[in-house]
Image (spheres, coloured by chain):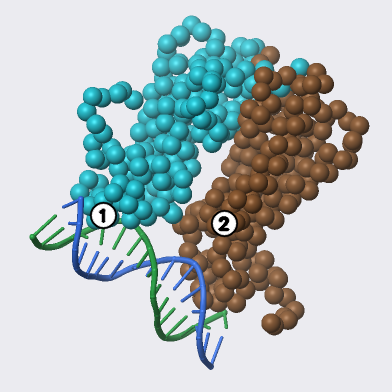
Chain colours: A cyan, B brown, C blue, D green
Amino acid sequence: METTATPLSRKAQIDQVATGLFRQRGYAATSMRELAAALGIEAGSIYSHIRSKEEILHRVCFDLAESFMAGLRTAQTAEPAASAATQLRRAIENHVRVLIADTASSAVFLHEWRHLSEPAHTEFQHLRQQYEAEFRALIAQGVQAGELYTPDPAFAALTLLASLNWLPNWYRPEGTLTPDQIAQRLTDQLLDGLAY
Amino acid sequence: METTATPLSRKAQIDQVATGLFRQRGYAATSMRELAAALGIEAGSIYSHIRSKEEILHRVCFDLAESFMAGLRTAQTAEPAASAATQLRRAIENHVRVLIADTASSAVFLHEWRHLSEPAHTEFQHLRQQYEAEFRALIAQGVQAGELYTPDPAFAALTLLASLNWLPNWYRPEGTLTPDQIAQRLTDQLLDGLAY
DNA sequence: CCTACCGATCGGTAGG
DNA sequence: CCTACCGATCGGTAGG
């Protein structure tokens, strides 16, 4: 997200406020009248800027999917000679960075996508599966190279991503840890474990 | 008022079907008319057995909270002389066992509790915090005893529970792993890490 | 961006 | 357990 000199467009403002409500109360339980009230306008006025409630959800989900995908590609191509374990670390760092950059959008991305109607619902699931497959592949490569150990890379990838994706639930920007330090701790714990 | 012979079975059936719908579509997006259709009756008829939609959610959430709590107490008292690391393993095994016993209820417990109204909403959060605190304490004890290592037991507990709680999203009863084998793998991965 | 309103659907109830 | 219905609220639109 780059910072622009101009203020948020009305549409972007609607997206932002809606994302906060979707996160807090859930997509289905958030009414357009609540959203309008939070924006200080009447419900009907929203539709000058957007076509439907689901359009907002669609934009949030797919914009964030693109951020995750783009970051992962960068992580994989920035150091093509790096070991699989290192590339996995980079992928984790990227994932954490995207989550932290906008925890509200991340929470909606993670939990509210199922309210997308077809064909977006299926398309989103495909993107998600692709992303998981990349993590799985990195872990499998690490195992083959003797850098990682797990009896089941698919299982390991799911567990790893679940740990990372819990971050929007506890992260507070006031905390003392930087995003990179958080990524470091998560990586250390997941790769090295808790056992002494 | 009435003392029928088997009111509980119909009520339990409503709970079960509702839980499946709440899991699949979300609490807010599930209508009582959908639930009625899934039960093969009319919407109004449901209210002979329950008082409100939220009553179902309340029962699912608090029944499962009790299962988790009871299992944790067992895990802690069954082997009082065991090391903290062993007690943590037992607690993980119990958690996995409760999740697997009813993945639909677990998913609702994990994701739909926020739709509880007060005071249940606050009460539920307290129970959840208690449960997390027990895991945190077990990890902290393990660290003090030199059995575990982590720079932040609270952080470690959150990450660990997040990994475990992803299970309802991927677990399939047709799989070849038994609940105890799944618990074993999760414990191994989380305690020993992925690194060789 | 507002007023005024649409048809559809919501959770829930009365009476049988 | 059904029929018939309640008031409230939903997402969205027309016209200005």
Q: Name the residue under label 2.
A: B118
Vertical arrangement, residue B6 with respect to residue A72, above or below: below
In the image, residue B43 lies at what x, y percent?
Answer: 50, 73
In the image, residue A69 lies at what x, y percent?
Answer: 41, 26
Along the viewing direction, whichever of A34 and A123 lies nearer the viewer: A34
Tell me if mark 2 has few (under 14), some (14-19) or many (20+) residues whose alpha carbon lies within 10 angstroms of its own: few
In terms of image quadrants, where is residue B120? Answer: bottom right
Quarter of the figure that contains the C terminus of chain A: top right
User: What chain letter is assigned to the residue under label 1?
Assistant: A
What type is the residue that disc 2 sits on? Glu
Along the viewing direction, whichever of B134 and A166 lies nearer the viewer: B134
Helix or strand or loop: what does disc 1 sit on?
Answer: loop
Can the viewer see residue B176? no
Quarter of the figure that contains the N terminus of chain A: top left
Q: Residue at x 57, y 74 (%)?
A: B47
Q: Mark 1 points at which residue?
A: A42
Vertical arrangement, residue C3 with respect to residue B61, above or below: below
Q: Residue at x 80, y 18 (%)?
A: B146
In terms of image quadrants, where is residue A75? Answer: top left
User: What chain letter is assigned to the residue under label 2?
Assistant: B
Q: Residue at x 56, y 68 (%)?
A: B52
Between the C-alphas of marks 1 and 2, the distance is: 28 Å
Along the viewing direction, whichever of B97 and A127 lies nearer the viewer: B97
